[in-house]
Image (spheres, helix red, strand yellow):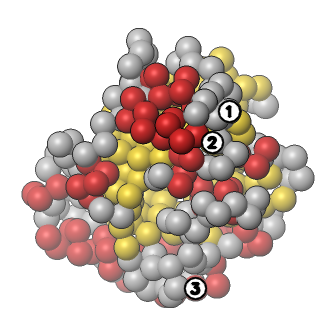
């Protein structure tokens, strides 16, 4: 079983808050003020508010066979000066509330590719109130520019990721296509970092997802991620400080927080699919 080496804290943000680019800086100042209250070191990057643009595409069958079974297939393309980079990132993940269930799913691809396998805990607010936290466990495979035709049948995807083979039975070779025909534009700023003490440090980002076709904002997100060698060896005080900071950020700026979903669930939910809201 793979060990957890990442803990990513995520707070979804109300899209209407990002009515212009200066709102990234407005929210970051709020975060730094909360960090000071908790004696968390906060460093602002030199190019903190330089906006990085990426295209994010989710793929699934018409009946959401992947997402209904806790799998996510996502393609992300990076842009430089308005032009797409020649390489893209393909992420295949299994995400579940039970750690062992997530750990037991082997996401290793059966193809020649530059693959990175990551097992992480994603810490989210409670679904129905600010000031709390819950966890999802994500077993990820990240491929850089794989020679894989995504918009083929589910059996074609299962040939690369055998862990979804059981889904091809009742669905046959169901076609895989863009979820809700929705291309997402992601605008992200790599604002800075936090120091929770005892060697526990995290890089922080703020992002907004937009419907590229209609140019409307869908959802925002504040996230920070820590990396470590051994989950059980995390310093108890540093871990507690990171959690207290995460919860207090919600309660001190509740009018920024969007509860009840993940970014993926928002994209699926736009089509009022049965799969939405599972996370």
Q: Position of residue 131 (x, y in %)?
A: 44, 85
The numbered mark, 3 or 2, whose residue comes first in the sequence reads 2
Foreground residue among 183 and 26? 183
The numbered mark, 3 or 1, whose residue comes first in the sequence reads 1
Quadrant in which the N terminus is drawn = top left
Label 1, label 2: how far apart the Cα atoms are:
8 Å
Image quadrant assignment for residue 166: top left
Instruction: Give the residue displayed 43% in from the left and 58% down from the top.
Output: 224
The numbered mark, 1 or 2, whose residue comes first in the sequence reads 2
Residue 34's tag is none
Q: Position of residue 91 (x, y in %)?
A: 50, 36
Which tag is nearer the camera, tag 3 or tag 1? 1
Residue matched to label 1: 175
Label 3, label 2: how far apart the Cα atoms are:
33 Å
Foreground residue among 246 and 163? 163
Residue matched to label 3: 254
Instruction: Give the residue displayed 58% in from the left and 33% down from the top.
Output: 172
| Residue 46 appears left or right of 110 | right
Instruction: Give the residue displayed 38% in from the left and 51% down from the top.
Output: 138
Residue 119 lies, with reference to residue 78, above or below; the image says below
Q: Position of residue 225 (x, y in %)?
A: 38, 55
Q: Residues within 10 Å of mark 1 (few under 14, many from 20)?
A: some
Instruction: Give the residue displayed 64% in from the left and 84% down from the top.
Output: 255
Foreground residue among 68 and 189? 68
| Residue 158 appears left or right of 154 | left
Residue matched to label 2: 60
């Amino acid at each position: 079983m793979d060990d957890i080496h990442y803990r990513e804290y995520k707070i979804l943000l109300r899209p209407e808050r990002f009515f212009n680019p200066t709102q990234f800086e407005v929210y970051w100042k709020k975060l730094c003020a909360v960090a000071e209250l908790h004696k968390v070191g906060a460093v602002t990057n030199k190019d903190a508010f330089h906006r990085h643009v990426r295209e994010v595409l989710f793929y699934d069958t018409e009946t959401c066979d992947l997402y209904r079974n806790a799998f996510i297939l996502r393609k992300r393309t990076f842009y430089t000066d308005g032009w797409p980079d020649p390489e893209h990132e393909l992420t295949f993940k299994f995400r579940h509330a039970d750690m062992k269930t997530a750990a037991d799913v082997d996401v290793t691809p059966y193809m020649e590719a530059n693959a990175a396998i990551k097992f992480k805990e994603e810490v989210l607010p409670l679904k129905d109130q600010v000031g709390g936290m819950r966890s999802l466990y994500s077993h990820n495979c990240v491929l850089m520019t794989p020679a894989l035709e995504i918009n083929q049948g589910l059996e074609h995807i299962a040939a690369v990721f055998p862990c979804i083979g059981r889904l091809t039975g009742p669905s046959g070779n169901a076609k895989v296509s863009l979820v809700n025909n929705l291309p997402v534009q992601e605008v992200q700023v790599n604002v800075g970092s936090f120091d929770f003490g005892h060697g526990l440090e995290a890089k922080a980002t703020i992002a907004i997802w937009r419907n590229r076709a209609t140019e409307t904002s869908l959802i925002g997100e504040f996230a920070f991620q820590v990396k470590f060698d051994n989950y059980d060896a995390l310093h108890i005080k540093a871990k507690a400080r990171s959690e207290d900071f995460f919860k207090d950020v919600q309660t001190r700026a509740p009018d920024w927080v969007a509860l009840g979903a993940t970014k993926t669930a928002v994209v699926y939910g736009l089509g009022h699919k049965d799969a939405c809201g599972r996370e």
